[in-house]
Amino acid sequence: MTTTRSPKEIIRKALSEERLKLLEHEAFELIKYYEIPVPETLLARDPKEAYELADTIGYPIALKIVSPDIIHKSDVGGVRLGLMNRDEVARVVEEMLKTVSTRVPHARVLGVLMYRMAPPGLEVIVGGVRDPVFGATIMFGLGGIFVEVLKDVSFRIAPVRITDALEMIDEIKSSKILEGYRGQGPVDKKTIAEIIVKTSKLMIENEEISSIDLNPVIVYSNGAIVVDARVILSKVSH
Amino acid sequence: MEHILGKLFNPESVAIVGATPKEGKIGRAILENFIKRFHGRIYPVNPGYDEIFGLKCYKSVTDLPETPDLLVVAIPAPSVPAVIREAAIKGIRIAIVISGGFRETGTPEGEKLEKELEEISKTYGIRILGPNCIGIYDNWSGVDTYFLPKMKRPPRGFVGFISQSGAFSSALMDWMAYHNIGVSRAISYGNKIDIDDIDLLEYLGEDEKTKVILMYIEDLKPGRGKLFIEVAKRVVQKKPVIIYKAGKTSRGSLAAASHTAAMAGEYSIYKAAFKQAGIIEVDSFDEMMDVVRIFLHQPLMKGNRVYIVTDAGGVGVMLTDALTSVGLEVPQTPSDLKYILRKELPPHCIIENPIDLTGDADDERYMRVLDILIEKPYVDAIVVVALPQIPGIKGSFIDHIIKLKNEYKKPIVALTIGSEVSLEVAEKLEKGEVTVFESPERLAKALKALYTYSIIKTRGDHHEKP
């Protein structure tokens, strides 16, 4: 985790282990390479390491189990949020490792991913897919019900320039929410647009990625941060 | 160097394999089409005849006295690959394969034949339009493989039409003939094993006889999307491209992989691509033809401010609603204009936009107001509502509208509603290239398309500058 790996190295490693979904810390590492804002994540292998790292990370802390064999982390007790001090962190890591190994005995566990939780803000989603006709295609939408129920999203074929990205943001039907509502100020559209452009670049430069979800991206009046990232690979390069 | 596709549209000689004198056969309809209008050399090919309709008939492609510029093939599918190979060896470089019975049948035999044909095209470098298509209707050269004798042929004109559907293409030609809309060239490309929408778009983009391109597509070939956008971007800087995408339901197969993949129905991606390319997308048949008509005859808009001149208050309000809801502006009359109009018009007329000349309006009143409006730099387009049922209208304002439109290079469109008396006005205006609509909503949508294209065009002109 300490040395920066190139996207190609991250992808090659996953594929060599026959994993088509990047582990969470790999996904973060990959998007960070493109200067997309992500939380500082650290991997703790045991409670002692977690205890030592906690203060440097800052609170509240989120913990997530890292294992190529576990798809639904929360179902097996592999996710804990909102931890407020290092004693608590160490205790929960110990518990988590124990619970997971009982519930999924044969899972390979690399450790526990630790990061500081992002303060609440407006949740948006930025994604990319590889379309058989148009190739890399980028999506933007508001998080939660806006994307899931209303399907209020916009698309552009990559490469997406900053002006296209700003257009995508304004194109969704609920774009007024980005201007601020219920006393909230307007959010930082420029940073969202930059994330869109960087996602476009990432999709173009890494043919092995078949789809990517940055969901949610939390946006503030100044800046934004990706809180969850999912990267799916395909074996054949397109 | 001349574009190879040029031979599709402007060959000097053509061989028709499957030509026959037999009534009701495709080979006969095509041969008759060529005899009627094509001025180049025509070679029927059919081993069963020595002569058809006074033309010497050849046993095979190999026997032809020259290498024709274009080959048209209308014989049963199983015999097609051999004929194409023979033609390629003869030196023929481009062929239209009308025959059906390939991949579209969904049978392994059809699939196999299509692959074979594709192989031959690649190996020998012979370009193929089709198979399973009705081919080309070229109004300027007389190339006409539309084997539908009952289909009326539209007049010579400037709309180029590229269609994935043969039946729709011929129906549209018939419709355009009936509505007197001129066509340059129409192409139905069928299974597109070689020449596809993108090649044709590029060709019509360069074609001097085509001023407006209309496309009907179902899908593009895999991997061709980016090139399509690239080509379209170039073409729209020269002329408008209007597209109707059929098959808008979303594809479910990717749904499981991720959120983004689940959202990315095929159509939403096409929609984004059209927008990026600067193509005008239309959602219905009505809109398609309305937009074609407005592009054919109207100059571009400098802004989105529309002024309405009407003799019916109600229709003025309907139009205001329709124009506003598509995003055009119906501004309030500025004070300088108010001042002039107040002086010019009787006191009961309404000088607020929509400017209502009321039911006692006559030709003269229309002309005076239009003369004033057309000069104003803040008027980007004028909609004339001319309900001719009122007694004061004799019709002399029609020529005046036409004159103003041509002099000022500003869009003027008209709305008429009614029976013969209204259709007569409409016809005269249309002849003078003033686009007429019957429905405020359709007028608004078409005008919006004109405005959208105007922005695309000016933005592009801007980019061009060093």
Image: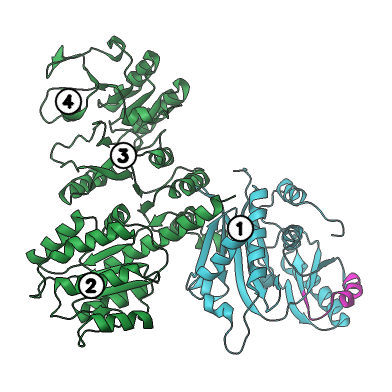
Chain colours: A cyan, B green
Circle number at residue B59: none
* Distance Cα–Cα, label 2 vs label 1: 49 Å
Q: Which chain letter goes with mark 2?
A: B
Q: Is A45 in front, or is B301?
A: B301
Q: Residues within 10 Å of mark 3 (few under 14, many from 20)?
A: many
From the viewer's perspective, is residue A8 above or below residue B348? above
Q: Earlier in the sequence, mark 4 or mark 2?
A: 4
Q: Nearer the viewer, mark 2 or mark 1?
A: 2
Q: Position of residue A115 (x, y in %)?
A: 79, 72
Q: Residue furthest bottom?
A: A183
Dominant secondary structure of the residues highlighted in magenta in the image = helix
* Residue of label 3: B187
- Residue type at mark 4: give it: Ile
Q: Which chain letter goes with mark 1?
A: A
In this image, B300 relative to B23: left or right?
right
Q: Are marks 2 and 1 on the same chain?
A: no
Q: Secondary structure at mark 3?
A: strand
* Distance Cα–Cα, label 4 vs label 3: 20 Å
* Residue of label 1: A161
* Residue of label 2: B368
Q: Are marks 4 and 1 in contact (CB under 8 Å)?
A: no
* Distance Cα–Cα, label 3 vs label 2: 46 Å
Q: In the image, is residue B364 part of the stretch drawn in magenta?
A: no
Q: Are marks 1 and 3 on the same chain?
A: no
Q: Are marks 4 and 3 on the same chain?
A: yes
In this image, A197 relative to B242: left or right?
right
Q: Which residues make up the magenta segment?
A: A48-62
Q: Secondary structure at mark 1?
A: loop
What residue is drawn where x is 24% and y is 69%? B384
Q: Residues within 10 Å of mark 4 (few under 14, many from 20)?
A: some
Q: Mark yes or no: residue A34 visible.
A: yes
